[in-house]
Amino acid sequence: MTKRVAIFISGGGSNMLRLIDSMTGDHPARACVVLSNTPTAGGLEKAEARGIPTEVVRHQPFDGDRTAFEHAIEAAISPYAPDIICLAGFMRKLTAGFVDPWRGRMLNIHPSLLPKYRGLRTHARALEAGDRLHGCTVHEVTPALDDGPVLGQAEVRVQDDDTADTLATRVLAREHQLYPAVLARFAAGNMDLLYLPA
Ligand code: GRF
């Protein structure tokens, strides 16, 4: 049975795009909806150009009431009957109230080799620490931020002249390889760690 995948974005959606484009042929999943918390997310028109329905649930009207915002998200995606949620640059924290029912069916990509550098500014922090190796992680989402079982990691070598921007660019390219590969395995029920060395 083909798994139905909802993808949550807040921005350009380059990861969302790679995920959509990877779900073809005998891939065990298909994108069923793209949801954004902002109507200006560039990824929305990219999804629509690929024939994927989109939904926007702005967080502002809920004025900090996370539970109400999350109920609105659930109401927006439930008509599409997703089996899996992929967070792809979705910049809103989700509470246990939303995450717990999706436990084991929700993935996120984070631009660091977790457990290093949870949260923001991951590339700058890796440079500040003098790390020679950096990268990205796909993990199952739990209520704790950027936590949860790791399903895949891809390494990126740090270069002497790297800035946060140049490093981010190379990490993003590795995200585009890692996320689709992990989703294909995850949708087929394979939870073995996928590790892509530099
Ligand atoms: C990526 O760097 C991802 O690691 C982080 O947000 C960014 C999303 O970029 N969670 P895009 O919207 O997929 O291009």
Image (spheres, rainbow, N blue to C red):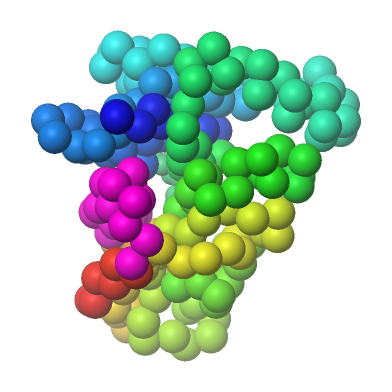
Decide if residue 17 is on the left or right side of residue 128: left
Decide if residue 25 is on the left or right side of residue 32: left
Decide if residue 13 is on the left or right side of residue 65: left
Q: What is the residue that sits farthest to the front in this orientation?
A: 1
Stretch of the chain drawn in magenta: 172-192
Q: Is residue 12 visible?
A: no
Is residue 149 rendered magenta in the image? no
Question: Residue sitting at 34 percent across and 69 percent down?
Answer: 193
Residue 93 picture quarter? top right
Q: Nearer the viewer, residue 125 or 82?
A: 82
* Vertical comparison of 47 with 175: above or below: above
User: How far across and how far down the image is residue 136, in percent?
Assistant: 40, 64
How many numbered callouts?
Answer: 0
Question: Residue sitting at 46 percent across and 37 percent down?
Answer: 84
Q: Is residue 33 visible?
A: yes
Magenta span: predominant SS is: helix
Is residue 173 rendered magenta in the image? yes
Question: Residue sitting at 30 percent across and 38 percent down?
Answer: 19
User: How far across and how far down the image is residue 162, in percent?
Assistant: 35, 73
Q: Nearer the viewer, residue 156 or 149?
A: 149
* Vertical comparison of 52 with 113: above or below: above
* Vertical comparison of 77 with 5: above or below: above
Q: Quadrant of the N terminus?
A: top left
User: How far across and how far down the image is residue 198, in percent?
Assistant: 23, 76
User: How far across and how far down the image is residue 148, in percent?
Assistant: 58, 63
